[in-house]
Each structure stands twice: as C-alpha cells, then as structure tokens.
Image (cartoon, rainbow, N blue to C red):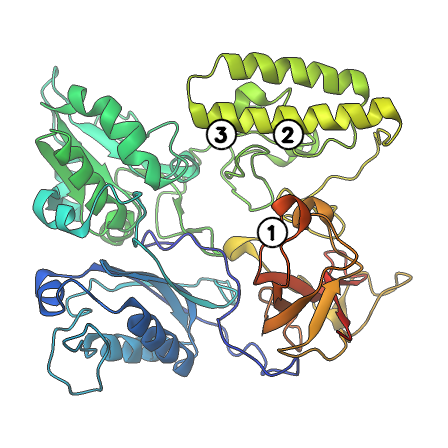
Amino acid sequence: MAADGPEVSPSGDGGIHESIRPVPAEGPPHRSVLLYYRYFPDDVLAATGADVSVQSLVSHQRTLCRRLGLRGRVLISAEGINGTVSGADADVLRAYIGAMESTALGACGTVEEAGTEGPRPFAGVDWKWSSAGGTRHIFPDLKVEPAKEIVSTGGSVSVRDVVEHGGTHLDPRQFHAMLTSRPPADRPPVLLDVRNTFEHAVGHFVGANGDPAEQPAAMTNFSTFEREYCKKNAGALADRTVMMYCTGGIRCEKASAALKKHGVREVYQLRGGIHRYLEEYPTGGMFRGKNFVFDQRVTAGGGGGDVVGRCLACRAPYDELCGSRVCAVCRDLVLVCPDCRAARRELHCRRHAYLATCYFAFLEPFAADELSWQLEGLRSAREAQESTNVRKTIMKQIVRVAARLEALRSGEAAADPGAPRRCRTCMESSNICDGRCWGFWRRSVPIELENCAEKGKEGFIPVPTPALISVGSRVAPGADWNELRLGESAGDRRGTVVETKSWGTGRSAAPDAVKVLWDVAGRGGRVRGAELYRWGVLSHDGTRLMYDVQKVDA
C-alpha cells in the first residue's frame, strides 16, 4: 500500500456471526484512501511505562472503522501503528482522523473515554491522502491485527533505535536537490531502495547520471534487511553518503537506524517516501516507472508513465504484477509477460532462477525419468549452497520428489502430462482459481452471478445456496477438501465452527467461509486449528460452489 502498509492477508473482519445469513450489500464505492504510520513518541511510552495495551488499541480501532464503514489493513504493536484505510468519501475519513487524534491513553496504556486527559498516541500523524481511482474497493474487507512490530525486523531494530539512531529526514524538494546535484566524481551518494525486489522492478528513483537506485537483490521481505544487507555492506558504506527511500517512509525509519547502528555515519531518508515525492513532482521527477502499493490498485500515484520493468524471461518491457504470477519456491511476485507465462508451467523469481529446471511445486505431470533428472539438479544445487535455510528448503523438495518417484515406480501413482495448471497458493486447478485467492488480491465472487458468462454451462449454479451453518456447528472435511493445500483428510476428523467470515470481496449474499477449530491435529501436521475454510465460494469459471468442509451431526 502507498504508505508501506501492512503486508497481511485478509481473513475477514474478525467479527462473529450467529449464522450464515444475508448481509448488507457491499455498500457504495470507496473513493478516498488514507495512509499513515506512527511510532509512538516518548511521552506515550513514558506515560504508560512502555506498556501500551495493544489489545485495547486493536478493539478501539475495529470499533471505529466499522462504525465509519471503512475497509483496509491496520497493524498495531506496542511500538506504533501502520495502516491504510478506505472510505466512501473524504468526509468519512476526516471523521476518522478526528477520532484518532482525540484518542487518549490512560495510565495502564488502555484507550480511555473521549475527553480523558492523557497521552495521545495518534497526535501528529502524517496523514497521506490518495484516491481509489477506478477501483470500487481497494480492499476486500477490514483487517485490524496486533503485531510484534509494525515493520518486522525480527526484533533487531526497536522503536528506541528509531528515535536514537534514525537518519536525517529530507523533504521531497531537499531529496530532489540532492539527487540532481553534481556529486564528487569519486564519492557519489549511494541511492538505496529498501523496498522488496518486485516493488523496485516496476518503479524506482534514478540518480543524476541516470543509474537506478541500488536494491538488495535478495530482499523479498524487509525483515531480512539488517541481516542480509547491513551486516554485509555497512563496512563499505561507513564513509559514504546514503540516500534511502521506500513507499511512504515507514521502512526507512528502521532501515536508517539499522545502518547507523552498523557504523554508517551519513544516512538520509525521504520523508513521506515516494508518495510525498510524487505529490510534489506529479510528472515523476527523478522517479521512473510505477509506485507499487499493497492493495487492489497495485500501483498508484503520479509519474511519467515510463515502463522500467522487464519480463524476467524475455526481457521485453513489462510492468504488470499480479497475484497469480508467483515463484514456485518462495511465492514472491514474479514479473513475467503473458506470452512467457503461457509457455511455462511454473514460474521462478530472479533469486530462484537457478532452480527453474528442477524445482516444481506440482509433480503430477512428470514421468520417472524427469523426476530423476530433477533430483540430480536439486542435489547439485543444495551442495552449492552455503545458507542453512536454503539447504533445508531444497532438502524438503528432494524428499517430495523422491517420494513421488517411488510412488511412480511402485505403481501407486501415474504421471499425468495433461494435469491442469494449479494455483500456487490454494492448490486448486486454474478453472477453479485464477491465482488471486490470497492477500489483498482475494475476491470471493469474481463475476456477478446474474450476468455470468458461464451461465449457460451445464451444472451452473445460478444462486449460492449453502445449507445453514452457525457458530458451534460440527463439521468434517467436505467434498472440496484439497489435500495438497490442507493435508490428509482423515475419515474421523471433526471440528467446531468458531466464526463465519467472508472469503474475500464480491457480491455474494452471505458469508462464504468458516473458521474451524479441530478436535485433533491432522496427520502430517498440515492442518492447524482455527483456520479459514471455504463454505460456498464460487469457482473462477462460475460453474460451482466449493465447500472445504461439510456439516455433520456430531
């Protein structure tokens, strides 16, 4: 999202419904978007003894957002808040800002009644405004979650570090002036992009000489920045000028502190990130390409319209990221054009390109000789790796391929060269899922039932008609239980519905998913308690409803 928003997957609004029943329509389009973050200042931490009640803030935030009809993603921790919310119009979001800025904390760090004297954790927030453009809803629902950190570093960078070691903030004009000035020939500043690789691929700043910003090649998640970048590069940067940026500023707060803790003395960061810069320079300035955001807009903000992205396979200009195009190994987004996607059964990101001929998530199409070749490639790749975690990942795949090869040789299984392509996330075939079933990409009903292009197909179900199910209902694995995704379906497995939810967004007339707490853990350890399962989700081709579980008597 445009303020370096929380990278979390939607799983409903957290509310409990008594039963699956008709719910209000999805409401008017959300035209306005608000992006923000805040590391709690010293007065808040001091007044509460650094013991902010995260659960109190979460409950307050959920109540406020529901009352105003907001959608979005908000993370709250003892160190601060990070969120993006959308509303029907600007007035609704102004009401949200007013309520947030008047929120006060009591001595125990809990939210107190309006008018209470106490530290105001959200006073002074830099509220960033944006437009939803032509997207009706940029988020499928509302998700407010507690977190250990609002930007994950594995605990290596604290809010105190941000205050004590953070870099020097430059506003967009100052940042632009430094970018365009003539640097010393032997000591040019290091322009550093601390976003993920796929964000950098579709848009980034360039320096005065036109060279793109440096970007940690192995960073697919910010939590690896301190470990993978700072420890390896801080020595070479100790006497250099570092200019860093991210989408909205929040990642730079911790990235600059991490670099300075490792001995880099001169670190500057773009205040408000790319978002504020493009407000100041709407035609792009020194920014090239598109600004990736973590919502259904995918990209937002101004810019010159340059296509800086390149298809990872053919290198043709291309910059459209999609939740259906992910790496077979790590599920990172892969920038690949439609032609190259059609020619490949599975995709591999730049970091895992060396595994493109031997690592596949789905093994059904391969014959025994092909699997044997894959095993040889995997073993060679594992031997060449120094990273313990990478070696473990490859070893798990070696075990999978070896088991499949044994099943083919024993006659227990047979290769299926015509096996359908599958979604890397939910494991369903492409006619059931278009690959956008996770994160902010998720949609429960991709097409309106009454105008469905598949309406004439045999077996088409014109109206969702799930049997009544309620909190407390007993369930067992159902007709659409997918063992690739959910683990083995033991015949005696039973669980209890603890919540009914929406699988995503869309125009379905009722919640179409249930959260189940299982009596006993599943064999193989693949199924955990209190997880979300489909209950009447429409397939991508519009021909059937899918039920992961079924209602049972006991």
* Residue position marked by numbered label 3 in the rendering: 310
Q: Find residue 374 and report its horizontal and vertical position in percent.
A: 68, 18
Query: Going by the image, does 432 lie left or right of 221?
Result: right
Which quadrant holds the N terminus? Answer: bottom left
Q: Report helix, strand or loop for mark 3.
A: loop
* Residue at x 14% of width, y 46% of height: 161
Q: Amino acid at mark 1?
A: Arg
Q: Position of residue 198 (x, y in %)?
A: 44, 37
Image depth: mark 2 or mark 1 in front: 1
Q: Position of residue 119 (x, y in %)?
A: 12, 73
Residue 261, image quadrant: top left
Q: Which is nearer the N-term, disc 3 or disc 2? A: 3
- Whole-Å distance between the Cαs marked 3 and 2? 12 Å
Amino acid type shown at disc 3 = Arg
How much space separates mark 3 and mark 1, taking CA atoms? 22 Å
Residue 436, which numbered label? 1
On the image, numbered disc 2 is attached to which residue? 340
Q: Please name which of the two marks, 3 or 1, marks the residue nearer to the observer.
A: 1
Q: Quadrant of residue 369?
A: top right
Q: Is residue 12 above or below residue 404?
A: below
| Callout 1: SS | loop
The answer to which quarter of the image holds residue 303 is top left
Q: Mark 2 belongs to which amino acid?
A: Cys
Q: Which mark is residue 89?
A: none
Q: CA distance from mark 2 to mark 1?
A: 19 Å
Q: Relative to 73, is 122 on the left or the right? A: left
Q: In percent of the image, x 41 and y 52: which residue is there? A: 7
In the drawing, does residue 535 fall left or right of residue 416? left
Mark 2 residue element: helix
- Is residue 205 visible in the rendered image? The answer is no
